[in-house]
Amino acid sequence: MITLPLLLPQVDRQSQFIQGYRVVYRQTSGLPSPGPWQTQDVKVPSERSVILSSLKKGIVYEIKVRPYFNEFQGMDSESKTARTTEEAPSAPPQQVTVLTVGNQNSTSISISWDPPPPDHQNGIIQEYKIWCLGNETRFHVNKTVDAAIRSVVVGGLQVGVVYNVEVAASTSAGVGVKSEPQPIIIGKEFRDVIIHGNRNNSITEQITDVVKQPAFIAGIGGACWVILMGFSIWLYWRRKKRKGLSNYAVQSFTFTPAGTVHLSHLLTPPNLSADSSSCPILVSMLRLPNV
């Protein structure tokens, strides 16, 4: 909001044909710059000030005044500039990305981001603050960088500690809204890459990322190979066992020229000899017709 004394053109100050004054203003800093001209009418000729509201915070505006009568407009006054009051950014930095640097034993991470949306910067961003918050206060690592920087490497982190990374922009009015915490564990087997913009990764997406890892694919392949080899060995052992039983059964049957089948190994009862006189019923049952 800007309270503006009307900059009246001297030639028209006493004119009886002035119906009112038209304040013309536009944005000259930030994005877009320069902005389109906007107007606000003062319909009482005796008024000598006006309040311009709904302006962006921390932005420079160019302002001038012209008298009007119906559809006719007079000459513009001299242009003036004014800056609205800055406030802390009302939105966090966008597209915050956190990833480990180097091999799996590295204790450094890389953090990158984009500025908050222009409508929520509320002034000129002077710096960015980065927090790497461990599960204990003694593990915290904080850093501050200039507004022109969009990425930074933070080192000296502790292996096995879960860190939550946050980023916030600052203006002369203070520190703005922090980004959502991005968790990362230092020293894991898989390369930890967590990317958050304006959305959060779901559990399904995190599982998908793990499944795509080469080590996970190699582990699944190795397990399948072990299972296949075990099944092949079992199948070979079973076929060999069945073949041995088949050979044993064939060898137990012998044929004599007289047409008598002797089951010497299978059909001899316990405690009985193979003599036919000792078991006449069994022998008679095994007599076959002469061929």
Image (cartoon, rainbow, N blue to C red):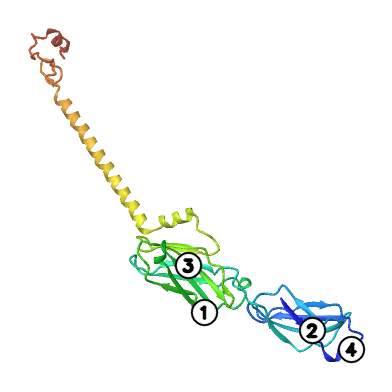
Secondary structure, mark 1, is loop
**Residue, disc 3:** 97
Q: CA distance from mark 1 to mark 2?
A: 38 Å
Cβ–Cβ below 8 Å for labels 4 and 2?
no
Quadrant in the rendering for residue 266: top left
Secondary structure, mark 2, is loop
Q: CA distance from mark 4 to mark 3?
A: 63 Å
Horizontal side of 233 relative to 202 (left or right) equals left
Q: Amino acid at mark 2?
A: Leu
Secondary structure, mark 4, is loop
Q: Does residue 283 sit above or below 8 in this rendering?
A: above
**Residue, disc 2:** 6
**Residue, disc 1:** 148
**Residue 133 picture location, percent across and down:** 44, 65
**Residue 121 picture location, percent across and down:** 60, 73
Q: Amino acid at mark 1?
A: Ala
Q: Nearer the viewer, residue 156 or 98?
A: 156
**Residue 79 picture location, percent across and down:** 74, 87
Q: Nearer the viewer, residue 125 or 31?
A: 125
